[in-house]
Amino acid sequence: MGDGENTWSEETLPGFHKRCLSSDAPPLDGKLYTMYHGTNLQAAQKIIKHGFIPSQDGMLGRGVYVSRDAEKAACYPLADEDKSNQVIFELRVNVGKVKKIDYQGHPLQKTWHDHGYDTAWVPPGHGMVKKMLEEDCVWDPNRIKVIIIIKAPVNYLARLQNLITCHAPSFGKSQLQSNEEPKEGKFYTMYHGTTLDAAEKVIEQGFQPSLKGMLGKGIYVSRDEEKAARYPLKEDDKCFQVILELKVNVGKVKKIDYQGHPLQMTWHEHGYDTAWVPPGCGMVKSGLEEDCVWDPNRIKVIGVVKAPGNSLVRLQNLLEHRLPASCKTCLQHNKDLTKKNCYIMYHGTTAKDAEGIITYGFQSSPDGILGKGVYISRYESKATQRLQDENPYQVILELSVNVGRVKVIDSQFHPLQKTWYKDFDTAWVSADSGMVQSGLNDCCVRNPTRIKVIGIVKAPETSLDHLQKLIDLRIQGFCKTCLQSKKGRKNQTYSLMYHGATLKNAPNIISYSLHLSREGVFGKGVYVFKHEESATSQPLNLDEDERYQVIFEVRVNLGKIKEIDYEGHPMQTTWYKQYDTAWMPAECDMNESGFDEYCVRDPNRIKVIGIAKAPDPKALLQQLVKNQSIFIY
């Protein structure tokens, strides 16, 4: 393949936008197209970190198999047990020179690359693919770039997306063999072995150079994971071993290939940034490659390869919160907050209020120990201790906080205890002030827009998936929100909602669109709900095949909303003449379901974006068999 930069040069052109080609449209040579790939969670992480590995054989021979049809990608992984860990990537693919393979037994079916083609394309409906969907096979993995995650297990969605950010092409990722000489100024994947305690400090605060070693002062890393796995050296520490994956900008490199080299300890004084000991030169007992990097700022932790027990997830969470784009830092409780920095903090609340916070942001408490503001803590345990009554704080939110200008309030009746906001953005009660019963520090942020929800630490099982999904959608930049019942409505509000349908009607809804109900409390329209369980509510006297077995996740542009809160309202069935949506609050007398209910007049304001609930394949087949048996005598 040619120059890697030329492969993606189209992205740098003015007016570039992602190109989605219909399945049956022939691709143009050398163009970039949006495609999809389905896999399992474990494989997905490897793909993001190291790129695709071509399949050695398949319908089109060797290559990476992708499709313009997300539905085709959703068929993988093939094993049923892997579906719970399914990940679907959205890709950008430079197709290069394309060969159409449109029938089984085509003379170039498996030899297209030998004839100068970069991609083989199977058009839909030609009988080569079971579901009659489009498929592509790309020879060179470097022609494929992962853009975003379309689907992943809820608890991994944000983490995988952050991995993509870390491994973005602009990062200049490269994996060298241990005996290859590194090129100056390039980024390389390397590893570092250490203890659990030290790993947390490295992730939070960066590396601290060793003051002495075989190559003098610096940070010792290796391209060999096996070499990193030898640390920590003490046998007692092995059970707390952590191996970190790093991205290293080596800068100017000096090869030190024998003991007693004149620059062995002084390489940095001669203008070098990294010293490299090649494998097998006799300097390292194991015979493995080693590097010493002078400046810690040249090293970035991008992954945790190994960690003891439950520490792996915790370290990965710490890591993803330190992405450059988020400017996040974790502090020890006795460290001062730094002006204009962002920190990870926590807030305890109820499940009901958590949804409003994620959707609309925080509301300031009118009063407290530090006056008006949003009260948060650097410690999860402190956020949990906020409970003073029988209604426990069921949800602990993880936050990214831009503290701005900070004032320490270190004694009761401090002169600025409730007036700090005139000159400062955040007030901080130090742990040793005696002002807080728990002995843990507390913070009050005046402006709620300085706080961003980035994760859920704790939530009831019934709420966790829904809340995490809301956060993930907002992190990805989707224009979706979930409405609180008592919040004011604004025109052009996009909302994440739900719609129930029968199994019979579901395919038509997916293929075409939602249809207006002919009757209902608001008359003609499409009825949608704020919560998934609301969409499952239905009359009990329906026949089984008329009951809602599929719950769609929909994005709704509510437009101009009219509240209809009592039976006989003058606009109960005529609201559509002036409004786009009718809304019946959960608490009004005319509402029998107990859920907020919405009726949207124009189906074009509603887009199906996912399936929240559907029968599993086995149950579906059983139902089909049952239906068929009615006609057998």
Image (cartoon, rainbow, N blue to C red):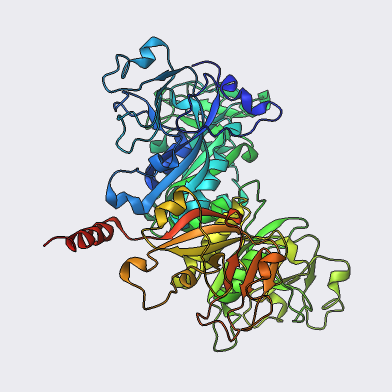
Q: Position of residue 443 (x, y in %)?
A: 71, 71
Instruction: Please name whichever residue, 600 or 341, is drawn nearer the observer in this view of the structure.
Output: 600
Residue 565: image quadrant is bottom right
Above or below residue 113? Residue 459 is below
Q: Who's the residue at 60% across and 46% down the image?
A: 208
Residue 100: image quadrant is top left
Q: Position of residue 113 (x, y in %)?
A: 38, 15
Above or below residue 329? Residue 548 is below
Question: In what quadrant of the picture does the C terminus appear?
Answer: bottom left
Q: Position of residue 512 (x, y in %)?
A: 48, 49
Q: Who's the residue at 48% across and 21% down the image?
A: 257
Left or right side of 121 for 80: left
Residue 419: image quadrant is bottom right
Instruction: Please name whichever residue, 346 or 584, is drawn nearer the observer in this view of the structure.
Output: 584
Instruction: Please name whichever residue, 293 or 306, is drawn nearer the observer in this view of the structure.
Output: 306
Instruction: Please name whichever residue, 361 or 406, is drawn nearer the observer in this view of the structure.
Output: 361
Left or right side of 327 for 149: left
